[in-house]
Amino acid sequence: MTGMPRSALLATVDLGSNSFRLQICAVEEGQLRIVDSIKEMVRFAAGLDENKYITVEAQQRALKCLSRFGQRLQGFKPEQVRVVATNTFRVAKNIASFLPAAEEALGFPVEIIAGREEARLIYLGVKHTHPPTNDNMLVVDIGGGSTEFVIGNALQPDIMESLPLGCVTYSLRFFNDGKITSEKFERAVSSARIEIQRISPELKQHGWDFAIGSSGSARSIRDVIEAYGLSSHHLDAAAMRALAKKVIQAGSVKKAKLLNLKSDRTEVFIGGLAVMIAVFEELSLTSMSVTDAALRDGVFFDMLGRDLDHDLRDETVKQFQHRYHIDVLQANRVNQVAQQCFAGLSQNLPRNQLDMWQKYLAWSAQLHELGMSIAHSGYHKHSAYILDNADMFGFSRQEQHLLAVLVLSHRGDTKKLLEVVTERQWWPAVLSLRLAALFCRGRQDIQFPSDTSLFYDFVEKTCTLRLSAQWLQDNPLIAGSLEQEAQQWQYINRHFIIEQQAS
């Protein structure tokens, strides 16, 4: 934080039914960069008694957390901080007597938002961090005490609904003793379906083109089913039913010892799974992608009052170039040559994928040297690590991993490619960036003879480069590097063939 003015910071506090979270972001050229994040599993909804009163114990847990948040927010001005509270604050009958103590501990006013406002802010966070599209998206957010359903494609959504379905409340209501049976689980799913039936006709009538799940429940379910190979990067009904069967057979989530399930999700996992299955079955969903965006992201963007006229990913790339002191001229040079190479190497890719791959290639070219700000030696490894792990607004984790693979692959030993290039269709982009970095090693603009051509054969795993013999003679550094590249490809049982054309 040294050297960063407080005025450049924004903070949100999300007081959810399951967890409380404080997040602080720096505002840099209209972009948000996370500088601190604190999450505590307060389980506020678990403190609701049968009469909807928050117990003293739950209040004390919350106040201790808010005191710690308040200490972190010392020095912030009121206009820099927004505190939003959700379902449990909405339904607790004694919340009015708790609020003064909560606001004193935190040092800022607490805004208890309505269910539809919560839905709007969740949608805003997803919309701002998702690639631009004109298609309608259905956003489903299973929180600790409520589930929000939103449909839209513009800045203002068309439908916003909130139902009293939550991973905490359903886990307590149907599995309070920790024991899970088939009968209990089906009762939980049926109960959730009955609730969803109140809004499903309106949702179905409006329609949507794709569905996105946000919140911890969606992410934890995705992580577990991926760990078991039941699905890849998304949720589907069969995978979730298989997961439920595994838990039921074990008798509890704890005994099931689910892979990739974080310990802080164990107590509320089964309730979230039951609600998500009910969502799929009641809305006849076949697939749902999962986003890292959440309510707090929507609150940030609402504070900024941004529009959506441009691709947020382009902004993020520019910000990273500035932050990591990237040589933009060299990055543009490498991108230009990479696109030229890709035009030849991508001939066997489906036409409808070309625009997407050209974007991924451009972003990876523009960021391939960001690791040089750490060290020149092995900079591509530093670059890949940052791309895989950084907070990159607008990019999904899958997209970040793809960029990391392209950047890691652009130089060095080819043997690593067999481990990291896990999809067949990635090879043309990998080779394009690799060749572009080789051709642009001199960090000068480069012109190829008009008869230069490239082709990649997926079946034979062979790349063929046709280039003027005279041009190669005039560029000995590149000629030598190409020969070394051809040798590298032999190490992985692939072929890089250089055909010299007569002048």
Image (cartoon, rainbow, N blue to C red):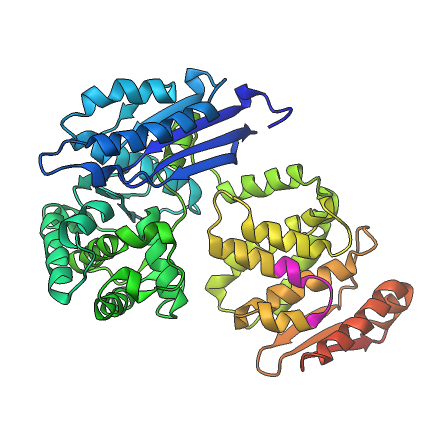
Q: Is residue 202 left or right of residue 416?
A: left
Apparent side of residue 408 relative to residue 244 in the rendered image (left or right):
right
- Is the residue 352 above or below the residue 202 in the image? below
Q: Position of residue 104 (x, y in %)?
A: 34, 17
Q: Is residue 62 left or right of residue 440?
A: left
| Left or right for 110, reference 27 | left
Residue, x 14% and y 31% (percent of image)? 53
Residue 416 image offset from top left, x and y in percent: 65, 70
Q: Is residue 280 visible?
A: yes
Q: Is residue 270 magenta?
A: no
Given residues 150 and 475, the one toward you in this image is 150
Quadrant of res 259: bottom left
Q: Which residues are magenta?
A: 406-414
Residue closest to the eye, 361 or 473? 361
User: In the rendered image of this protein, does residue 478 appear above or below residue 138?
Assistant: below
Q: Quadrant of residue 227?
A: bottom left
